[in-house]
Amino acid sequence: MFTMDDAESHFLSFMNLVEAHILAGIRRKHGVGLPQVRRALEYVRSKCGVERPLIDQGFQTDGHFLFVEQLERLINASKGGQMAIPDLLPRLDRIERDSKGLPVRLFPFTRAAESADSGANPKIVVVNPRVSFGRPSVGGVATSTIWNRFLAGDSPAHLAQDYGLAPEAIEEAIRCEAA
């Protein structure tokens, strides 16, 4: 499906984490079967010349197949290039990219309802390889730090005051770690 950037040490890179995030959405939220995912990735690699399709290509889905935009048309990559019109994949909206199109920040889901509605799953917790060593964080504070203090008995209101964060940010950090 995708290759680990550091296969010898068995650690995932940030790019591997982004690929896993997208793959999880394709599989869990949209129920696209592994054979369709494999066919789509192979199609995009071979026909579009894309080395890392999960990162470099904006996939969309209807819940059964994966689609890519090619020459301003939606193509069913799982079906070898057939044209189609699917729903958008909400997980892709949670990846912030730089000017070259490479992922730089990931806003993981902190709630069960994976929907395009930002109120249902706000973009508060962030995974940024340049902040907190790539661990999930809010306002530059690792969610694990907030979680450990919460488990030790600090109230969310006290944590919000200590870190200068909104109470909603503290609640999302706790929700992220409790999952």
Image (cartoon, rainbow, N blue to C red):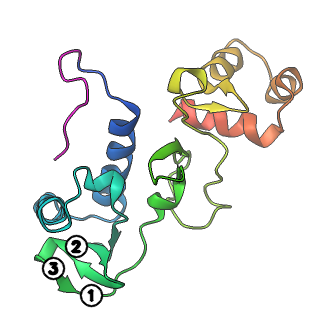
Q: State the residue lying farthest toward the front.
A: 100
Residue 8 lies in magenta, yes or no?
Answer: yes
Determine whether, in the image, residue 51 is placed left or right of residue 22.
Answer: left
Q: Is residue 81 above or below residue 127?
A: below
State which quadrant residue 78 falls in: bottom left
Looking at the image, which is closer to me, 6 or 20? 6
Residue 43 appears at what percent x and percent y? 13, 66
Q: Is residue 7 above or below residue 73?
A: above
Looking at the image, which is closer to me, 141 or 115? 141
Report if the CB atoms under discs 1 and 3 are less than 8 Å apart: no
Residue 154 appears at what percent x and percent y? 78, 17
Label number found at residue 81: 3
State which quadrant residue 87 falls in: bottom left
Q: Which residue is mark 2?
A: 65
10 Å neighbourhood of mark 3: few (<14), some, or many (≥20)?
Answer: some
Residue 123 appears at what percent x and percent y? 64, 50
Quick one: SS at disc 1? Answer: loop
Residue 6 lies in magenta, yes or no?
Answer: yes
Q: Which residues are magenta?
A: 1-9
Camera-side mark, 2 or 1: 1
| Residue shown at 57% from the left, 27% from the top | 130
Q: Amino acid at mark 3?
A: Gly
State which quadrant residue 110 falls in: top right
Report if the CB atoms under discs 2 and 1 are less than 8 Å apart: yes
Q: Amino acid at mark 2?
A: Phe
| Residue shown at 53% from the left, 49% from the top | 98
10 Å neighbourhood of mark 2: few (<14), some, or many (≥20)?
Answer: many
Label number found at residue 84: 1
Disc 2 to disc 1, C-alpha distance: 10 Å
Quick one: SS at disc 2? Answer: loop
